[in-house]
Amino acid sequence: MPPRKSPTLRQRRLGAELRKMRAAAGITTEAAAALLGVPRTNIPNMESGRSGISAERVRTLARNYSCQDAELVDALAAMATDRTEGWWEHHRDTLTADFVDVAELEWYAKRLRVALTVHMPGILQTEEHARALFKLVIPRLSSAEIEARVAHRTGRRQVLDKPDPPVVDVVLHEAALRMQFGGPRVARRQLEHLAAASTRPHVTVRVIPFKAGGFPGAGQSVIYAQDRVQQLDVVELDSTHGPEFLDSEEQLRNYRSQLDEMQSLTLPPEASRDLIRAIAKEL
């Protein structure tokens, strides 16, 4: 099978963890290839995500790399086993890989911690709200490009209805509730949708009120996706040029601390829902 042209974020992450493991063990690519009985070039392809690897081979490499972290090895083997083509793959011909990878990241997460100051969480946006946002993108998008992004954005909501949905913890600043993207009617419907979503058993929405003052990460939109083990967590940051993914130990630790501090400033979930509904009624 020829190497993949565009490995997904999850495929790249699996390969990167295998590369880290091999480097820590001081084993060459030639020696690693010999362990699996494959050509030497197979190892760089596996470690870049350009080639697949079976769970059995993941365990073989981990054992010979003397990895003692059984939970990490189990998680990597699970990543190698699941080769299901998700709904998001149908968007790879119309959107950049990074946008599509966000949906994959959310789908496999065990918990999603989301923090935003002026925007709504992607998985909790209405179609009208998403369309209003994409009409503001610079450079301007064509109608076809807008609709492609809207379809992908609303498709991300499927993660909330899967049999084993992730726990979703959202922290929003009050400013996000008062932004009127698309006008008052669209904004009101978005807030009503947000309030309704916050009643779902696996979704919690907390609001930082204006009176809370300053807080860390005020200018960022953050998704912290928790995996089965902490080493495989990923942070996704929104920016003008598209999503950015972070996964170093220090970066993950810093964003966990930032999200903890932001959450400490929020209203309780019930009071947050009351505020959301009150602002919706004002529109």
Image (spheres, helix red, strand yellow):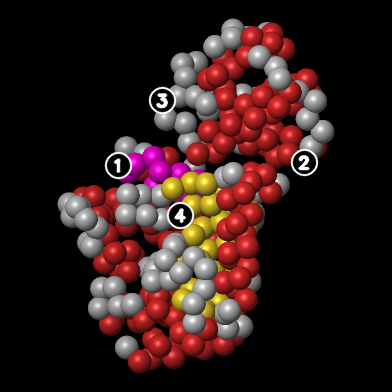
Q: Please report the residue visible at 60 percent of the width from the left and 52 percent of the height from the top.
A: 252
Q: Say whether residue 97 is magenta.
A: yes
Which residue position is annotated with label 4?
Answer: 237
Compare marks 1 and 2 and give the one earlier in the sequence: 2
Name the residue located 39 percent from the left edge and 71 percent from the top edge.
Answer: 118
Residue in the image at 52% along x and 46% along y: 246
Residue 146, numbered circle: none
Q: Give the camera-side residue of 242 and 213.
A: 213
Amino acid type at mark 3: Lys
> Can residue 78 be seen in the rendering of this structure?
yes
Look at the numbered disc 1 and give the secondary structure of its residue. loop
Which residue is labeled 1 in the image? 94
Q: Of helix, strand and loop, which mostly describes the magenta segment?
A: helix
The residues tagged by marks 3 and 2 sit, at their Cα atoms, a distance apart of 30 Å
First reached walking from the N terminus: tag 3 or tag 4: 3
Query: Which of labels 1 and 3 is toward the front?
Result: 3
Side of 17 relative to 213 (left or right): right
**Where is residue 177, by image quadrant?**
bottom left
Q: Quadrant of residue 176?
A: bottom left
Q: Is residue 174 above or below residue 43?
A: below
Residue drawn where x is 78% and y is 30% of the image: 67
Q: Amino acid at mark 2?
A: Glu
Would you call the spot at circle 4 few (<14 residues within 10 Å), some (14-19), or many (20 or more)? Answer: some
On the image, numbered disc 3 is attached to which residue? 5
> In the image, residue 115 lies at what x, y percent?
50, 66
Is label 3 or label 4 in front?
4
The magenta stretch is 95-105
